[in-house]
Image: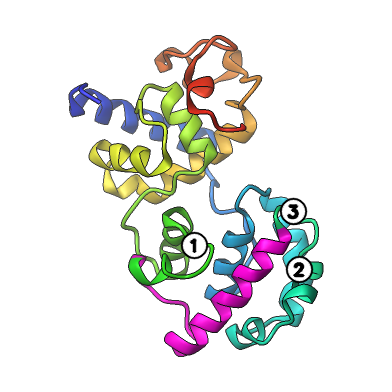
Amino acid sequence: MGEPLEPRRDQAVEVVDRLETAYPDSTISLQYESQLQLLISVVLSAQCTDERVNKVTEELYRTYETAEDFANADEKQLAEEIYGITFHNSKAGYLKSIGEDIVEKHNGEVPDTMEELTELSGVGRKTANVVLQHAHDVVEGIVVDTHVQRISRRLGLTEEERPEAIEQDLLEFVPRRNWQQFTHLFIDHGRAVCTARNPDCGDCELADICPSEKGDSDVDLASGEPW
């Protein structure tokens, strides 16, 4: 994107300031009590709502408390226990593999580096960023979920389409102090106002600095994402 960084940096700061006022309690919505639970929940949340994940894991974590429990799980039974989660059969395989790798390669502890996390089954950079930020207090990137992907493009903060490219674009001008909260604010705003199909532009805190028009933006169409 050829636009100078300073205008985009100023816009990003303004966006964050306004959204922090609108959503003062913005934070992660997944429920967890340990680093392992967070990792499992984030893996399950891919293409699935946090609300659904929280409902399923409330019972799941009573049965599976350690990485060894997941490593020793019967995959078919595990799939049944996470039924209702999108792609539950595939994710059951991910969870068992994650348990095995954590036991065999990481002494039963959730790893704390991007490289090690992304070597686990079902863990990409987005998932790893969430785990690093909330399990290890390590902030080295911006979590780009579908809300960040959609809204950052609507606001003209990026023209990129792939999450990895969007993240690298945002990292150039979003102040590092805002990297973690940036995602939570965009998720809250995406759920409440800037929805995929019917954004409430008339009641949007960002309307005067957003170049997109309600129902008449090519941003979502260009991405090809099923928002």
Depth check: give the residue in front, 158 or 185: 158
Q: Is residue 126 left or right of residue 9?
A: right
Is residue 102 in the magenta section?
yes
Of labels 2 and 1, earlier in sequence is 2
Question: Can residue 190 be seen by looking at this rendering?
Answer: yes
Please name the predominant secondary structure of the magenta segment in the image.
helix
Question: Looking at the picture, which amino acid does disc 1 mark?
Answer: Val
- What SS does tag 3 mark? helix
Instruction: Name the spot of residue 39 as percent of width and height, x first.
Output: 54, 68
Can you tell which mark lies on residue 123? 1
Query: Image point 37% across, 72% down: which residue?
Result: 116
Q: Is residue 84 above or below residue 214?
A: below
- What SS does tag 1 mark? loop
Give, as a single range, the part of the protein colored magenta. Answer: 88-114
Can you tell which mark lies on residue 39? none
Q: Which residue is mark 3?
A: 52
Instruction: Name the spot of residue 210 as percent of width and height, x first.
Output: 43, 17
Of labels 3 and 1, earlier in sequence is 3
Question: Looking at the picture, which amino acid does disc 3 mark?
Answer: Arg
Spatial CA distance of label 3 from label 1 is: 19 Å
Depth check: give the residue in front, 93 or 193: 93
Q: Is residue 23 above or below residue 97?
A: above
- What SS does tag 2 mark? helix
Query: Image point 77% across, 60% down: which residue?
Result: 55
Query: Image point 47% across, 83% down: which residue?
Result: 109
Question: Looking at the picture, which amino acid does disc 2 mark?
Answer: Ala
Query: Image point 62% across, 72% down: which residue?
Result: 95
- Name the image quarter holding residue 105: bottom left
Q: Which residue is mark 2?
A: 79
Instruction: Name the spot of residue 37 as percent of width and height, x first.
Output: 60, 72
Instruction: Name the spot of residue 154 as percent of width and height, x first.
Output: 45, 22
Q: Is residue 209 left or right of residue 79?
A: left
